[in-house]
Image (cartoon, coloured by chain):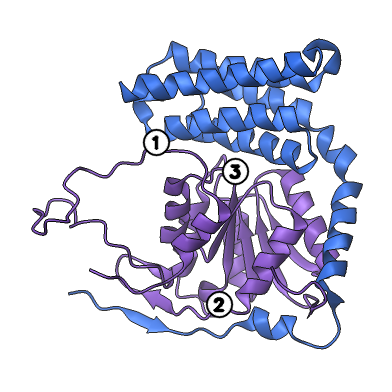
Amino acid sequence: MVDPRAKINLDGANILLLEQSEHGLEILVQMFHGFGGRNCHKCTSIDEARSVVMRATLDLIVADPNLQAGDGHEFVRWLRTSGLDPNRTVPIIMISANGTKAAVERARDAGASYFLVKPVTPRVLLDRIVRVQTDKRAFVVCDAYAGPDRRFKFEGPPPGVTPRRSTDIKTKLTDTGGPNMSQSDIDALFKPQRASL
Amino acid sequence: LTKSLSFTPEQRLASLMRRPGGVSIEEAVARANQRVEAVRNHCVSALDEKIDAMGAVALDGASPAQIYALSSEIFSLAATFELEELAQAASSLCDLLAKAQAQPDMAQSGRAFVESVGVHVDALRTLRRPELGGDAAARQAVVDGLRKVALKHKVEQER
């Protein structure tokens, strides 16, 4: 947790909030106004969010990937690969009620910087925003991914390739759903670290 | 091999946040909490409409992802404003729908899935009305029952 006496200044920061629910959006706006952030772009659809990204220089995006029309992951993936500078490298915090490992990995692999499980309190959200300042991760662009450097984790050979090592996982990995992860486990999935193979 | 590029982008937000002025984190959190509290009635009064809307799209054969989006809204509002039982019921529905998204066979299996969603919608309506929901023990029994319904689907899928 950050020092509660430390000062922050969000006045002048351009923040895009993507949340399909008018009321959920209202709660986020109130939180940011409380933090001193006045320039909030409120979006309830991917089309609106894309329109804002094209015309404004953003400093932070907070997005719920679960939208009735469209998929917030696709928006993040589109932005990360869009070539729109400087917005393509903007920090993105995803917030979702679904905190399963599969959901967290999906957000991370789309290019999200952080992931928070709902309900998000002002303290938790602000703590995460403050951590953005100390995020030294490189931005990676390759054919399969664009976004903050991800932890490299060995999960066996690619599909269709015969396992060779004794430690290779031989069964098919499936999305099993599972219970929501704790916030510290979620953070670990976003923390880059060297792989030991 | 594919080519990859790696660079350290400028952190505009970090520079902005470190400018002189602003407020302490303690004060910012207190102000945000006050502001969220100020919209409580507006948000909580919308819950009935959202539950009805979710019930309608579920009956219309909406996909688990579409129902999930609405269920997640209800959970988020209920949990934010500490309506614990409603939040637990919505969370149970979110779990059920997340499983259905991960395992499409479950949603396609038809009646049992639709009925499970319907049971959750009815329970959410009941828990919104204390005069119908009974005492705390009765309301908790409703929530526990929903968890069993969601768990039953999981067990059946794993067979």
Which residue occupies the foreground of this view, A46 or B144?
Answer: B144
Find disc 3 in the rendering and name its residue: A97
Under circle 2, the secondary element is loop
Amino acid at dot 3: Ala
- Residue B102: mark in rendering: 1
Amino acid at dot 1: Ala
Residue B54: which quarter of the image?
Answer: top right
Find disc 2 in the rendering and name its residue: A135
- Left-right relation of B21 to A76: right
- Left-right relation of B149 to A49: left
Residue at x 53%, y 19% (from the top left corner): B148
Q: The chain coloured blue carries which letter? A: B
Residue B89: which quarter of the image?
Answer: top right
Q: CA distance from mark 3 to mark 2?
A: 24 Å
Which is more foreground, mark 1 or mark 2?
2
Chain to which the residue tagged by mark 2 belongs: A
Q: The chain coloured purple carries which letter? A: A
Residue at x 22%, y 43% (from the top left corner): A172
